[in-house]
Image (tube, rainbow, N blue to C red):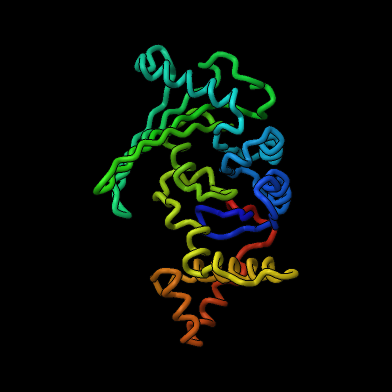
């Protein structure tokens, strides 16, 4: 389980997870390592837990949590409300809408974000148990490939005020882990899963193919890969992909020193990741 700073493109920390079910306990442990004050934390559906939402708001941060069938009653309630409201054109509803069309990776994606204050909805299931809940979100994605078109609808809970542009930006930058973003970094370019930390670790560093399995080896090498990724991301004089920069580091001692120098801290360790 990794924490990824989407604005700075850095891995902030990680905790060991032995099984999917343990992510629920790993996420709070990971948040304990970080100063998330003033940040927006986005987490996949596995981390959509009332205790995690409370921990984030207690740290004076905001959350955007994916809502799926692991909360069946709440998910169905939100889904049904949006279907009814959308069929009526959101008449009489204070709705914020943002639309974005992107081309790349052999597809055209049309993404539409709807955000509604919870005050506009009937009382949600266990609503008072979700600390700081302000807004419910629906994201509709239509992806057009050369041979097919896919349609996906996703729902979210967030402590942010209803603002489709701001919330949509936070969701776009999410990469399948605990993501920490700056609240002021709203106009950031989209960073889909193709450019996320997981994709880079799997494809560039071949983490999934690693045969290191025993003792503390897997955890130690996971730390080293993330340190290497951070150093390569911070080095900006050679504007190439992480794979190309990694190869150049291996073949050029001078560039290797530049990468190591870029990894040196430039601010006090106690500074917030959002600053």
Residue 257 coordinates in the image, percent (x, y): 54, 82
In front of the other: 47 or 184: 47
Where is residue 217? Give x, y as percent.
Answer: 70, 71
Q: Is residue 206 visible?
A: yes
Count up the numbered dots.
0
**Residue 25 x %, y %:** 73, 45
234 vs 95, left or right, is right
Above or below, comparing residue 74 to residue 63 in the picture: above
Q: Say if residue 100 shows up in the picture.
A: no
Image quadrant containing the N terminus? bottom right
Using the image as rendered, state which of residue 142 and residue 211 is in the foreground: 211
User: Which residue is at a point 55% across and 26% down the rendered structure image?
Assistant: 75
The quarter of the displayed image where residue 64 is located: top right
Residue drawn 54% across the image and 73% down it: 262
Residue at the farthest left position: 146
Rendered residue at 44%/81% (across/down): 248
Q: Is residue 89 above or below residue 250?
A: above
In front of the other: 101 or 7: 101
Q: Viewer-proximal residue, 270 or 215? A: 215
Give the answer, above or below, for where 266 lies relative to 34: below
* Image quadrant where residue 150 sits: top left
Percent x, y for residue 178? 60, 48
């Amino acid at each position: 389980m990794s924490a990824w700073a989407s604005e700075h493109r850095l891995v902030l920390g990680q905790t060991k997870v032995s099984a999917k079910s343990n992510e629920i306990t790993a996420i709070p442990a990971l948040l304990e390592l970080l100063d998330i004050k003033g940040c927006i934390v986005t987490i996949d559906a596995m981390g959509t837990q009332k205790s995690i939402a409370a921990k984030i708001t207690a740290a004076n941060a905001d959350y955007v949590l994916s809502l799926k069938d692991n909360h069946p009653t709440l998910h169905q309630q939100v889904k049904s409300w949006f279907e009814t409201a959308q069929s009526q054109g959101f008449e009489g509803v204070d709705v914020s809408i943002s639309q974005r069309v992107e081309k790349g990776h052999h597809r055209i994606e049309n993404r539409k974000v709807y955000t509604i204050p919870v005050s506009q909805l009937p009382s949600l299931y266990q609503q008072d148990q979700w600390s700081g809940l302000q807004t419910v979100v629906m994201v509709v994605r239509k992806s057009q490939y050369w041979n097919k078109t896919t349609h996906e609808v996703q729902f979210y809970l967030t402590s942010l005020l209803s603002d489709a542009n701001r919330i949509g930006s936070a969701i776009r930058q999410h990469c399948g882990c605990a993501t920490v973003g700056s609240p002021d970094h709203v106009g950031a370019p989209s960073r889909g899963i193709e450019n996320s930390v997981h994709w880079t670790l799997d494809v560039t560093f071949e983490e999934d193919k690693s045969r290191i399995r025993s003792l503390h080896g897997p955890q130690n090498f996971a730390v080293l890969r993330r340190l290497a990724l951070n150093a390569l991301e911070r080095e900006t004089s050679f504007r190439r992909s992480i794979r190309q920069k990694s190869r150049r580091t291996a073949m050029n001692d001078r560039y290797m020193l530049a990468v190591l120098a870029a990894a040196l801290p430039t601010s006090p360790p106690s500074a917030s990741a959002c600053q």
